[in-house]
Amino acid sequence: MRSDLPLFPAQASTTAPHVDLLFLVVVALSIFFASLVVVLLLGFAVKYRRRAGDKPPAPIEGNHALEIAWMVIPLILAMGVFVWGAEVYFRLSRPPDDTLNVNVVGKRWMWKLQHPSGRREINELHVPVGTPVRLNMTSEDVIHSFFVPAFRIKADVLPGRYTTLWFEATRTGRYHLFCAEYCGTQHSGMTGWVEVMEPNAFQAWLSGAGSEVSMAAAGERRFNDLGCATCHSGTSGARGPNLDKLYGSEVKLEGGKTATADEAYLRESILFPAARVTAGYQPVMPTFRGLVNEEGILELIEYLKARAAAQETAPTGTPAVPTPPVPSAKKATVGSLP
């Protein structure tokens, strides 16, 4: 595609060519059939116009071959576009296994982004070129939409749940970031930039964060401050289940159902602990709504991710991370997360 075509921004991600090609084919098919109908309409109007002295035309008998053709050919084209679109959609929905994860919180009227290392950004996102990046997004207030035209990615950012996006930038540079969902009077000002850097430059930028602690470390501190370790001590008879290998595992629930302990499940367990109670435990955990904001929840989730990852590499039977000391809880908790 021509880079100077003003209707299209630069193709700066691996998925952009696929999205553009599908879009152009749909536009070309629409123009072709619209033109075909108009040309035939005008041609038949001229050829079969009524002339002076003409008798009324005889009734036209049906033509089964023609009728089948104008039903089957559009059906094949429509199904082909549908399958192609589904393939592109699945490509956009399934990030690779090894991605750089960035947490995004939308708020009127700004984007708050945080890397696992703890580096925070407002309306800016720095990423390395040639590296898949996965965005884990939520909103603190209303519906927003994370949109980077150069990457051809857009997804709603919703309060109360997580949505994800992924992309792999193919060229360095600065690219516009927009909110594509009207979210209030200053919606048009909710813009930013994605800065795509060389990997070495990105690492230098990331390490220049000063004294910021990682999200996992901040989550561990918050975990202790909230007194979660009181019940999730991992000891026999604890009121809450052991969280060492929780993230990504299959959790058995009361009632016989199961759930995958992903980000959405962990968030729900923190804010609505009675929604899905782990089998073998009582629903005694209090809600932490109003005590932890969205950024704090993301930090707790990063801590549980790190805890599970460390446990996988630790020798069997030994804790991979130091067991947090039982704090003097600031808030009363008798939890059973999840």
Image (spheres, rainbow, N blue to C red):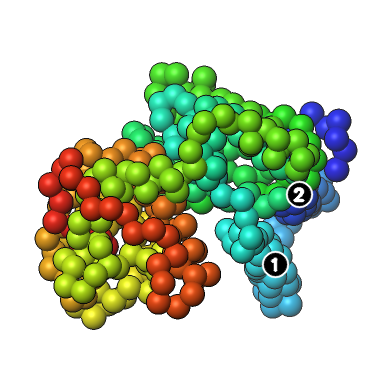
Residue 104, above or below 92: above
Q: Marks 1/2: CA distance?
A: 31 Å
- Say the numbered circle drawn on residue 209: none
Q: Residue furthest bottom?
A: 256
Q: Quadrant of the N terminus?
A: top right
**x and y, in percent, of residue 312 in the image:** 49, 70
Q: Residue at x 58, y 58 (%)?
A: 93
Residue 261, above or below 330: below
**x and y, in percent, of residue 143 in the image:** 40, 37
Residues 225 and 170: in front is 225
The residue where tag 2 is placed is 130
Q: Residue at x 23, y 53 (%)?
A: 326
Residue 186, above or below 27: above
**x and y, in percent, of residue 24 in the image:** 76, 48
- Inspect the image, locate mark 1, and give the three-letter code of the amino acid beneath it: Gly
Q: Residue at x 33, y 64 (%)?
A: 243
Residues 311 and 119: in front is 311
Please report contact status of discs 1 and 2: CB closer than 8 Å, yes or no. no
- Inspect the image, locate mark 2, and give the three-letter code of the amino acid beneath it: Gly
Of the numbered discs 1 and 2, the one sitting upstream in the chain is 1
